[in-house]
Image (cartoon, rainbow, N blue to C red):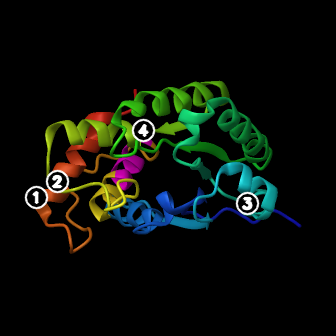
Amino acid sequence: MAKAKRSSAINMLFIGNSFTQRNNLPGLLAELAEARSLPVNHELISVGGASLRTHWNAGRASKAIATGGFDYVVLQEQSTLPVKNANRMAENMRLFDELIKRAGSKTVLYMTWARQHSPETQQAIADAYSTIGSELAAIVVPVGLAWRDYLSRHDKPVLYDRDQSHPTLAGSYLAACVFLAALLNQNPIRIESGPDELDQSIRLALQRAAWRQVGPRK
């Protein structure tokens, strides 16, 4: 099948699980980007609890990469695999990265956060993503590090859902702000549009946390 033609918008494919799907992270990012006059088209391939190996074996994600004409393909690994088996995670990402580069797209790695009851694992998660990101020359979006920084400074809003794993809307909004900064090199601070459930002062605090973590690319 022929590859789809690229549009004038930024075309993104997200591959992951509920950490990406919950609260519609791609949609939150698109809304932020629109406020900076950057139209974003996005697709999501998500399976609850899935690792990237699960997606690889299923084949749907590989087909989408080959035919989708995406500018960026975002890979989100199962949240505890970087701690339990960083080598396996790296293997999974190498498989997809080869396809992504062959399709003329750019690999993006979505660094997630530690479980609420084990914050000490955040550094291992960060190291796993940074190491394979450097090897693949991929863009690493340091959401987990932004979470750690925000939690060290603020008690509210709560970023973790009741299961101490998944994000609340505030957690997903912070992730979207980090994506805007790290991937699209746009400052999220003072963007007024956003979820009505989060008041403007909360959105501003989350925006600042994202920009503090990423800042402008040199």
- Distance in Å between CA atoms under marks 1 and 2: 5 Å
> Image check: 30 left or right of 206?
right
* Residue 89 magenta: no
Which residue was labeled with disc 3?
A: 61
Disc 3 to disc 2, C-alpha distance: 35 Å
Amino acid carrying mark 1 in the image: Ser
Using the numbered discs, state the Cα–Cα distance from disc 4 to disc 2 in whole angstroms.
19 Å
User: Which amino acid lies under the numbered mark 4 shown in the image of this protein?
Assistant: Pro
Label 3 to label 1: alpha-carbon separation = 38 Å
Residue assigned mark 2: 204
Provide the secondary structure element on which disc 3 rests: helix
Label 3 CA crowd tier, 10 Å (few <14, some 14–19, many 20+): many
Left or right, 63 with reference to 178: right
Residue range (magenta): 175-182
Q: Give the distance between the C-alpha atoms of the residues marked 1 and 4, in whole angstroms.
A: 23 Å
Q: Which residue has dot 4 on it?
A: 142
User: Which secondary structure type mostly characterizes the magenta part of the structure?
Assistant: helix
Q: Between disc 3 and disc 4, whose residue precedes? A: 3
Label 4 sits on a secondary structure element that is loop
**Is residue 152 shown left or right of residue 210?**
left
Q: Dividing the image into 4 quarters, which one contains the C terminus? A: top left
